[in-house]
Amino acid sequence: MDNDTFLYEYLGGNIKNLRKSRKLSQEELASFISLSRSSVANIESGYHQPSIHVIYQIAVVLECKITELLPSIDSYKKSKVEIDEKFSEILDSLPNKMSKKNLTFLKSIITDDEE
């Protein structure tokens, strides 16, 4: 799972949990923020990346702070560490040195893009 996937799945899960705790349906939340029910479903499942404006609107309706919807910095960093560990496991399991060199090269490209 990459960091973006982690972020949007975490956000969506928190929205879903808070919505349910407030006894709101997806349809009701959608009507309050002028979106379709399917858009809310996609946000909750992490498939849709809502704008900061939509996240703000959702926080207002759910009567919470935006920070309650987002993961902490520590959990976000932990996700990156887990990705690096998984990548290392895959790299270590490859028998072919050429493949390892290719993956190491790809990892260096990915790392440079993230920084």
Image: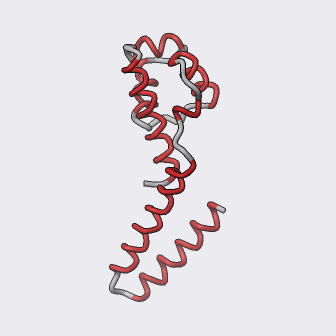
Image quarter of residue 87: bottom left
Residue 102 position, x and y percent, is 48, 79
Residue 64 position, x and y percent, is 54, 23
Question: For the point 42% across and 74% down, which residue is it?
Answer: 88
Q: Quadrant of the N terminus?
A: bottom left
| Coloring basis for residues | secondary structure
59 or 43, nearer to the observer: 59
> Is 46 drawn above or below residue 114 in the view shown?
above
Q: Quadrant of the C terminus?
A: bottom right
> Is 35 drawn above or below residue 92 in the view shown?
above
Question: For the point 40% across and 27% down, which residue is it?
Answer: 16
Left or right: 72, with 100 as reference point: right
Question: For the point 55% across and 31% down, which residue is it?
Answer: 50
Question: For the point 52% across and 32% down, which residue is it?
Answer: 69
Left or right: 52, with 90 as reference point: right
Image quarter of residue 46: top left
114 or 67, nearer to the observer: 67
> Is 68 drawn above or below residue 95 in the view shown?
above
